[in-house]
Amino acid sequence: MKRVVTTLRETLSVTALEARAVLLVALVFSVGTAATFLETESDLHAHATATRIDEMLDSLERREDATSGPVSTDQQNVEITQTSPQEARAPTHPRRPINLNTATAAELDALPGVGPATAQAIVASRARSRFTSTDDLLDIRGIGEKKLERIRPYVTAP
Protein backbone atom coordinates (compact mmCIF):
# COMPACT_ATOMS: atom_id res chain seq x y z
CA MET A 1 0.00 0.00 0.00
CA LYS A 2 2.88 2.34 0.84
CA ARG A 3 4.45 1.65 -2.52
CA VAL A 4 1.22 2.64 -4.34
CA VAL A 5 0.91 5.87 -2.34
CA THR A 6 4.56 6.70 -2.99
CA THR A 7 4.17 6.03 -6.72
CA LEU A 8 1.05 8.25 -6.84
CA ARG A 9 2.84 11.03 -4.95
CA GLU A 10 5.72 11.02 -7.37
CA THR A 11 3.58 10.66 -10.50
CA LEU A 12 0.98 13.28 -9.62
CA SER A 13 3.22 15.58 -7.54
CA VAL A 14 0.81 15.56 -4.61
CA THR A 15 1.04 15.09 -0.85
CA ALA A 16 0.62 11.71 0.81
CA LEU A 17 -2.89 12.63 2.00
CA GLU A 18 -3.94 13.68 -1.51
CA ALA A 19 -2.51 10.44 -2.95
CA ARG A 20 -4.55 8.42 -0.44
CA ALA A 21 -7.69 10.38 -1.41
CA VAL A 22 -7.09 9.67 -5.10
CA LEU A 23 -6.56 6.00 -4.29
CA LEU A 24 -9.79 5.88 -2.26
CA VAL A 25 -11.79 7.51 -5.06
CA ALA A 26 -10.35 5.08 -7.60
CA LEU A 27 -11.16 2.14 -5.33
CA VAL A 28 -14.77 3.26 -4.78
CA PHE A 29 -15.21 3.83 -8.51
CA SER A 30 -13.82 0.38 -9.31
CA VAL A 31 -16.05 -1.37 -6.78
CA GLY A 32 -19.12 0.50 -8.05
CA THR A 33 -18.34 -0.37 -11.66
CA ALA A 34 -17.79 -4.04 -10.79
CA ALA A 35 -21.03 -4.14 -8.82
CA THR A 36 -23.09 -2.97 -11.81
CA PHE A 37 -21.71 -5.84 -13.90
CA LEU A 38 -22.39 -8.40 -11.17
CA GLU A 39 -25.89 -7.17 -10.35
CA THR A 40 -28.75 -9.23 -11.76
CA GLU A 41 -32.11 -7.62 -12.41
CA SER A 42 -35.08 -9.19 -10.66
CA ASP A 43 -38.77 -8.73 -11.36
CA LEU A 44 -39.12 -6.75 -8.14
CA HIS A 45 -36.72 -4.11 -9.36
CA ALA A 46 -37.55 -4.09 -13.05
CA HIS A 47 -38.44 -0.73 -14.48
CA ALA A 48 -42.14 -0.29 -15.22
CA THR A 49 -43.17 1.48 -18.39
CA ALA A 50 -45.66 4.33 -18.28
CA THR A 51 -48.18 2.16 -20.13
CA ARG A 52 -47.84 -0.63 -17.56
CA ILE A 53 -48.28 1.84 -14.70
CA ASP A 54 -51.45 3.23 -16.34
CA GLU A 55 -52.80 -0.31 -16.73
CA MET A 56 -52.14 -1.02 -13.06
CA LEU A 57 -53.83 2.20 -11.94
CA ASP A 58 -56.84 1.54 -14.18
CA SER A 59 -57.23 -1.98 -12.84
CA LEU A 60 -57.07 -0.67 -9.28
CA GLU A 61 -59.74 1.96 -10.07
CA ARG A 62 -62.00 -0.71 -11.58
CA ARG A 63 -61.45 -2.88 -8.53
CA GLU A 64 -62.18 0.04 -6.20
CA ASP A 65 -65.37 0.93 -8.10
CA ALA A 66 -66.52 -2.70 -7.94
CA THR A 67 -65.95 -2.99 -4.20
CA SER A 68 -67.06 0.59 -3.44
CA GLY A 69 -64.09 1.12 -1.18
CA PRO A 70 -60.34 1.18 -1.01
CA VAL A 71 -58.45 -1.93 -2.05
CA SER A 72 -56.10 -3.62 0.43
CA THR A 73 -52.48 -4.22 -0.47
CA ASP A 74 -53.10 -7.97 -0.87
CA GLN A 75 -55.98 -7.29 -3.27
CA GLN A 76 -53.80 -4.86 -5.22
CA ASN A 77 -51.13 -7.52 -5.77
CA VAL A 78 -53.71 -10.01 -6.99
CA GLU A 79 -55.39 -7.41 -9.20
CA ILE A 80 -52.15 -6.32 -10.82
CA THR A 81 -51.17 -9.84 -11.77
CA GLN A 82 -54.59 -11.28 -12.59
CA THR A 83 -57.12 -9.26 -14.58
CA SER A 84 -60.23 -11.09 -15.67
CA PRO A 85 -61.57 -10.64 -19.23
CA GLN A 86 -64.69 -8.94 -17.82
CA GLU A 87 -62.57 -6.34 -16.01
CA ALA A 88 -60.44 -5.81 -19.11
CA ARG A 89 -63.57 -4.79 -21.06
CA ALA A 90 -64.87 -2.50 -18.29
CA PRO A 91 -64.90 1.19 -19.24
CA THR A 92 -61.99 3.18 -17.90
CA HIS A 93 -62.29 6.58 -16.33
CA PRO A 94 -60.31 9.48 -17.79
CA ARG A 95 -56.74 9.71 -16.49
CA ARG A 96 -56.92 13.51 -16.46
CA PRO A 97 -59.92 15.69 -15.70
CA ILE A 98 -61.95 16.55 -18.80
CA ASN A 99 -63.45 19.97 -19.48
CA LEU A 100 -67.25 19.85 -19.31
CA ASN A 101 -67.51 22.55 -21.98
CA THR A 102 -65.41 20.71 -24.58
CA ALA A 103 -65.79 16.99 -23.81
CA THR A 104 -67.47 14.71 -26.32
CA ALA A 105 -70.46 12.57 -25.41
CA ALA A 106 -68.20 9.49 -25.50
CA GLU A 107 -65.77 11.07 -23.02
CA LEU A 108 -68.64 12.02 -20.73
CA ASP A 109 -70.08 8.50 -21.04
CA ALA A 110 -66.79 7.12 -19.62
CA LEU A 111 -67.33 9.00 -16.34
CA PRO A 112 -68.39 6.87 -13.35
CA GLY A 113 -72.17 6.64 -13.12
CA VAL A 114 -72.75 8.50 -16.40
CA GLY A 115 -74.44 6.62 -19.21
CA PRO A 116 -75.21 7.61 -22.80
CA ALA A 117 -78.46 9.40 -21.88
CA THR A 118 -76.83 11.48 -19.13
CA ALA A 119 -73.88 12.27 -21.42
CA GLN A 120 -76.30 13.56 -24.09
CA ALA A 121 -78.12 15.61 -21.43
CA ILE A 122 -74.81 17.23 -20.42
CA VAL A 123 -74.01 18.05 -24.06
CA ALA A 124 -77.52 19.50 -24.57
CA SER A 125 -77.27 21.55 -21.38
CA ARG A 126 -73.93 23.11 -22.35
CA ALA A 127 -75.38 23.97 -25.78
CA ARG A 128 -77.88 26.21 -23.95
CA SER A 129 -75.31 27.69 -21.55
CA ARG A 130 -71.69 26.88 -20.78
CA PHE A 131 -70.74 25.32 -17.45
CA THR A 132 -69.13 27.75 -15.02
CA SER A 133 -68.42 25.17 -12.29
CA THR A 134 -68.76 21.46 -11.74
CA ASP A 135 -71.71 22.16 -9.44
CA ASP A 136 -73.71 23.08 -12.57
CA LEU A 137 -74.00 19.33 -13.18
CA LEU A 138 -76.62 19.22 -10.41
CA ASP A 139 -79.02 20.83 -12.91
CA ILE A 140 -78.79 17.71 -15.12
CA ARG A 141 -81.52 15.15 -14.59
CA GLY A 142 -80.01 11.99 -13.13
CA ILE A 143 -77.09 13.69 -11.39
CA GLY A 144 -77.45 14.20 -7.67
CA GLU A 145 -75.02 15.01 -4.88
CA LYS A 146 -73.61 11.47 -4.60
CA LYS A 147 -73.08 11.04 -8.33
CA LEU A 148 -71.51 14.50 -8.56
CA GLU A 149 -69.01 13.54 -5.85
CA ARG A 150 -68.05 10.44 -7.87
CA ILE A 151 -67.68 12.50 -11.05
CA ARG A 152 -65.95 15.56 -9.58
CA PRO A 153 -62.35 14.19 -9.67
CA TYR A 154 -62.70 13.52 -13.41
CA VAL A 155 -64.16 16.83 -14.63
CA THR A 156 -63.31 20.52 -14.68
CA ALA A 157 -65.19 23.64 -15.65
CA PRO A 158 -63.61 27.09 -15.95
Image (cartoon, rainbow, N blue to C red):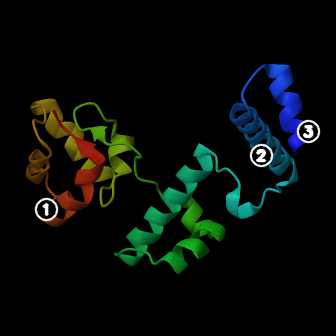
Crowdedness near tag 2: few (<14), some (14–19) or many (≥20) residues, C-alpha within 10 Å: few
Q: Is residue 71 left or right of residue 15?
A: left
Q: Is residue 132 depicted above or below 62 in this figure?
A: above
Looking at the figure, which quarter contains the C terminus? top left
Disc 3 marks which residue? Answer: 3
Q: Residue 125 lies in what quarter of the image?
A: top left
At label 2, the amino acid type is: Gly
Residue corresponding to mark 2 = 32
**At label 3, which amino acid type do we have?**
Arg
Considering only order in the chain, which callout, 3 or 1, is on the residue closer to the N terminus? 3
Q: Could you say whether the residue bearing mark 3 is in a helix, strand or loop?
A: helix
127, 52: nearer the viewer: 52
10 Å neighbourhood of mark 1: few (<14), some, or many (≥20)?
few
Alpha carbon separation for disc pair 2 and 1:
60 Å
- Residue drawn at the location 87% of the way across and 42% of the way down: 2
Vertical placement of 153 versus 26: above or below?
A: below
| Comes first in the chain, label 3 or label 2 | 3
Residue 36, position as x, y percentages in the image: 80, 47
Question: Residue at left 43%, top 63%?
Answer: 61
Marks 3 and 2, how far apart at CA: 24 Å
Instruction: Give the Cα separation between the discs numbered 1 and 3.
Output: 83 Å
Is the residue under label 2 in contact with that under label 3 (CB below 8 Å)?
Answer: no
Taking the spot 23% from the left edge, 38% from the top edge, the residue there is 100
Relative to residue 156, is residue 26 drawn left or right? Answer: right
- Assign a secondary structure to mark 1: loop
| Helix, strand or loop for disc 2 | helix
The x, y position of residue 84, in whole percent, is 62, 70
Q: Which residue is mark 1?
A: 144
The location of residue 92, given as percent across then percent down, is 46, 54
**Is 72 rendered above or below residue 37?**
below
Residue 18 placement (x, y as % from top left): 70, 32
